[in-house]
């Protein structure tokens, strides 16, 4: 039985530059020889290249798909960038220059006196957003599980978002949960199908799927 990905849900967001850096020298599963990255307008497609040469060139291999958006980030007192403006009080102003803002402090007049206003530097950063279920984020079945492993490694570098999945490795079901770059405890939970419940529930005494 081949390893498969049954369910997947992702809310991962990573700076686009970090995604490109990750794939400069990735640790790829043996089934994948290389990675190809293509951008089409605001869509990023990360495709797997099979290591097996006998795989038909007409067989689509697994790929990751992300939307590209722009978010404004702000420089804090430590010189680091964050998504929320620093709390500079009522005298603060924000510079929205594309290069992070420049120049010295701006001056304003109040009651005949000049007061210096602290200028907060900001800039726009492109983010790759891997958001959605399996059919949206992880596409095509050939090399699906190896590409899922690549996605997990990418998720462990993300500061924001989560990745949750149920996979079959051999004959065992496994649950995967990665939140804000860290692996979290997860387990597979079996529940009744609501559609079966509406029809009178499940007859556990006479069920052909249970020995």
Image: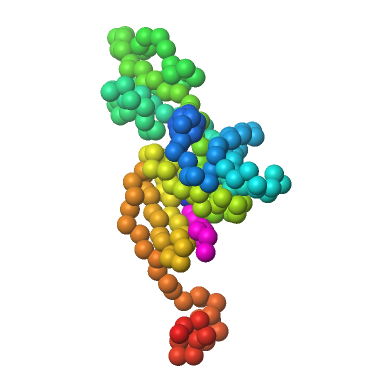
Residue 166 at x, y = what percent? Answer: 45, 60
Residue 203 at x, y = what percent? Answer: 48, 88
Boundaries of the magenta span: 1-9
Q: Nearer the viewer, residue 24 or 119?
A: 24
Q: Residue at x 36, y 30 (%)?
A: 82
Relative to 131, does residue 84 appear above or below in the rendering? above
The quadrant in which residue 35 appears is top right
Is residue 107 at all visible to an observer of this figure?
no
Residue 90 at x, y = what percent? Answer: 32, 25
> What's the image's color scheme?
rainbow
Q: Nearer the viewer, residue 99 or 205?
A: 205
Q: Nearer the viewer, residue 103 or 211?
A: 211
Q: Residue at x 55, y 39 (%)?
A: 33
Q: Residue at x 48, y 26 (%)?
A: 124
Horizontal relation, residue 45 to residue 122: left or right: right
Q: Nearer the viewer, residue 189 or 108?
A: 189
Image quadrant for the C terminus? bottom left
**Residue 67 part of the magenta segment:** no
């Amino acid at each position: 039985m081949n390893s498969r990905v049954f369910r997947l849900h992702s809310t991962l967001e990573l700076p686009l530059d970090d995604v490109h850096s990750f794939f400069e020298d990735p640790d790829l599963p043996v089934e994948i020889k290389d990675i190809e990255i293509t951008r089409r307008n605001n869509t990023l497609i990360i495709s797997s290249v099979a290591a097996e040469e006998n795989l038909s060139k007409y067989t689509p291999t697994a790929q990751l798909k992300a939307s590209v958006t722009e978010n404004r980030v702000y420089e804090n007192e430590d010189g680091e960038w964050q998504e929320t403006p620093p709390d500079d009080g009522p005298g603060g102003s924000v510079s929205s220059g594309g290069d992070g803002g420049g120049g010295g402090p701006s001056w304003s007049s109040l009651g005949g006196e000049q007061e210096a206003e602290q200028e907060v530097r900001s800039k726009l950063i492109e983010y790759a957003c891997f958001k959605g279920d399996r059919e949206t984020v992880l596409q095509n079945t050939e090399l699906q599980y190896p590409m899922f492993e690549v996605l997990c490694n990418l998720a462990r570098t993300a500061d924001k978002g989560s990745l949750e999945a149920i996979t079959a490795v051999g004959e065992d079901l496994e649950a995967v949960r990665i939140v804000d770059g860290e692996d979290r405890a997860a387990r597979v939970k079996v529940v009744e199908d609501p559609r079966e419940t509406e029809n009178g529930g499940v007859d556990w005494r006479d069920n052909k799927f249970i020995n």
